[in-house]
Image (cartoon, rainbow, N blue to C red):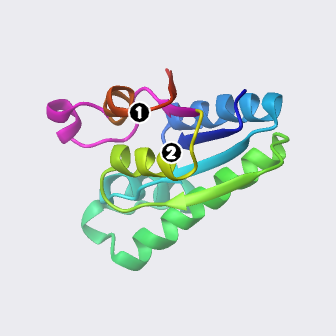
Amino acid sequence: MISSIVVGIDGSDAADRALVLACVVAKKFGATLQISHSPRDETVAYAAEAISGFYVGPNTVHKEVLHEAANRLVEKAREDAIAQGVDSVEIHVGQGDPARDLLAVAKSVNADLIVTGRRGLGDLGAFVLGSTSHQISKQAHCACMTVP
């Protein structure tokens, strides 16, 4: 039985597909969907541009813009999940490393499944340390699904 699902989002197409699949599974099992996002300058700049329609370069992103864009991103994801028929949706906005934050959320809610996109908007460090989805699959204590 799957009762709690954590999905990581960052504004990328892969994360959008991960959210859709997580919603399908959550709806099928009546699971609570935990939407998690850890804002980073490079990912929030991209998301802010997509939401607002104007370019926001990483050098111009300030704390309040970062926070506002992160909140808009998770609220839009919550609205999308509810529109797809998921009854129970919670959001989490972390700080710092997305893999660490996702794993912490999964542990705190005793998640049965973590869903991530295969390749999101991660930085150059992902090439050295491994992508968020790779880090999660190595460290998670529950099932993991990586969506292309």
In the displayed structure, does residue 80 sit left or right of residue 102?
right
Tell me if label 1 and label 2 are in contact, CB under 8 Å: yes
Say whether disc 1 or disc 2 marks the residue closer to the N-terminus: 2
Q: Position of residue 88 (x, y in %)?
A: 78, 51
Secondary structure of the residue carrying tag 2 is helix
The quarter holding residue 113 reads top right
In the displayed structure, does residue 15 sit left or right of residue 130?
right
In the displayed structure, does residue 134 sit left or right of residue 79?
left
For disc 2, the neighbor class at 10 Å (few under 14, some 14 to 19, many from 20) is many
Tell me which residue sits at (50%, 45%) in the image: 106
Question: Quarter of the image containing the N terminus?
Answer: top right
The residue carrying mark 1 is: 140
The residue carrying mark 2 is: 106
Could you tell me if residue 10 is visible in this image?
no
Front in this rendered view, residue 4 or 47 = 4
Query: Residue 50 got which mark?
Result: none
Name above or below for residue 130 compared with residue 74.
above
Q: Which residues are magenta?
A: 113-131
Name above or below for residue 21 compared with residue 5.
above
Tell me which residue sits at (52%, 51%) in the image: 36
Distance (Cα) linking label 1 and label 2: 8 Å
Q: Position of residue 110 (x, y in %)?
A: 56, 44
Q: Position of residue 59 (x, y in %)?
A: 24, 66
For badge 2, the amino acid type reads: Ala
Pick out the residue farthest to the bottom: 64
Could you tell me if residue 24 is visible in this image?
yes
Q: Position of residue 48 (x, y in %)?
A: 48, 60
Q: Is residue 117 magenta?
A: yes
